[in-house]
């Protein structure tokens, strides 16, 4: 009978407190507590986020263990998000994991949050084959990653300014939409005409992205139109959102196509919070058919921040015996 490898994983990089248990590579629980307190501020407030993590982490871990029907004595190691993320939030998860590992005399495994987003593709079937290119799009990151193995990844392109998630959120704020802005734009875009208005695509060398230009273009466009008609935004919300989202998605897919041709890769994946965007998911499927790609898109629950993706990363690091020391501290800026 094979050894039972049961691992606990903690995610606390931003405004979700999450815990997951994985047994022999199979996710058995994934408990996520989302903080709603930030909605009235139009963005995540770091101090409030870290306090909420302190309140939620014990109940979330307890729920994850119970759902997986695992006791803490059965665990072989505990993994945690070391970064990137908000320092105060990361401190809560890191400190809990260190204390838990010390108390239970089990190893500690650090996980890079962006690597975990990519490894979310190995939670469920179908799974991509190596090598594949992953377009990783989250709140603060936009990257093209050449994935050679579970723990061997190379960033081949990334944004030089705003991430696409920031472009969505800042665009939504200009339009007077509630936070988080990305899902709100996606919702309106589904009812609008993507060709109603034209916004520029920034030309960057190689596989680099830029989203500051389109965000600025939207601002000037809205200022001009609102001067002409104060009701312009309300009356044309669906078309504005559809056109803005169309430009952002087109920018992403242009670079993705360039990357697959350069590296001669046909397996393509997306990961990160913006991967939950329906406009992006649909456009990727359409492009995949034209380019003859094998396209891999995670379930919605594994796109946003969650501990299941941390658990998968923890599992492969455990197999590779990549353990860390108790002296470890969070890395708010943790490069892949």
Image (tube, grey):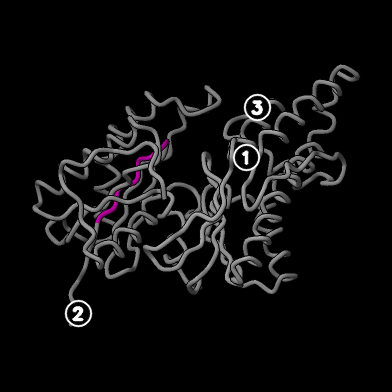
Where, by quadrant of the figure, is residue 164 drawn?
top right
The disc at residue 2 is 2
Q: Residue farthest to the bottom?
A: 1
For the residue pair 256 and 221, the one nearer the viewer reads as: 256
| Residue 302 x %, y % | 47, 55
Residue extent of the magenta highlight: 8-14
Q: Residue farthest to the front?
A: 205
Residue 90 colored in magenta in the image: no
Work out which quarter of the rendered image holds the N terminus and state it: bottom left
Q: Which residue is mark 1?
A: 182
Q: Secondary structure at mark 1?
A: helix
For the residue pair 77 and 232, the one nearer the viewer reads as: 77
Q: Which residue is mark 3?
A: 173
Is residue 201 placed above or below 35 in the rendered structure?
Answer: below
> Mark 1, residues whose alpha carbon is within 10 Å: few (<14), some, or many (≥20)?
many
Is residue 244 placed above or below 176 in the rendered structure?
Answer: below
Q: Earlier in the sequence, mark 1 or mark 2?
A: 2
């Amino acid at each position: 009978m094979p050894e039972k490898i049961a691992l606990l994983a903690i995610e606390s990089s931003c405004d979700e407190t999450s815990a997951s248990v994985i047994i022999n590579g199979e996710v058995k629980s994934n408990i996520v507590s989302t903080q709603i307190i930030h909605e009235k501020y139009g963005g995540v407030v770091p101090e409030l986020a870290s306090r909420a993590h302190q309140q939620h982490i014990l109940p979330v871990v307890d729920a994850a263990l119970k759902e997986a029907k695992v006791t803490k004595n059965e665990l072989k190691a505990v993994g945690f998000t070391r970064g990137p993320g908000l320092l105060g939030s990361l401190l809560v998860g890191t400190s809990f994991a260190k204390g838990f590992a010390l108390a239970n005399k089990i190893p500690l495994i650090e996980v890079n949050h962006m690597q975990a987003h990519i490894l979310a593709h190995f939670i469920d079937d179908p799974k991509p084959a190596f090598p594949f290119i992953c377009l990783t799009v989250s709140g603060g990151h936009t990257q093209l990653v050449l994935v050679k193995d579970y723990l061997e990844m190379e960033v081949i392109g990334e944004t030089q300014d705003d991430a696409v998630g920031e472009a969505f959120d800042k665009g939504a704020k200009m339009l007077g939409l509630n936070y988080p802005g990305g899902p709100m734009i996606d919702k309106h875009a589904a009812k609008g005409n993507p060709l109603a208005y034209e916004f520029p695509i920034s030309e960057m060398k190689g596989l680099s992205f830029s989203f500051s230009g389109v965000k600025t273009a939207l601002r000037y466009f809205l200022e001009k139109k609102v001067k002409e008609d104060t009701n312009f935004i309300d009356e044309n919300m669906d078309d504005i959102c559809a056109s803005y989202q169309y430009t952002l998605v087109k920018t992403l897919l242009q670079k993705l196509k360039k990357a697959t041709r350069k590296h001669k890769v046909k397996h393509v994946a997306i990961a990160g919070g913006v991967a939950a965007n329906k406009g992006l998911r649909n456009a990727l499927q359409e492009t995949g058919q034209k380019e003859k790609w094998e396209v891999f898109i995670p379930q919605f629950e594994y796109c946003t921040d969650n501990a299941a993706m941390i658990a998968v990363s923890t599992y492969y690091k455990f197999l590779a015996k990549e353990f860390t020391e108790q002296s470890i501290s969070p890395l708010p800026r943790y490069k892949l």
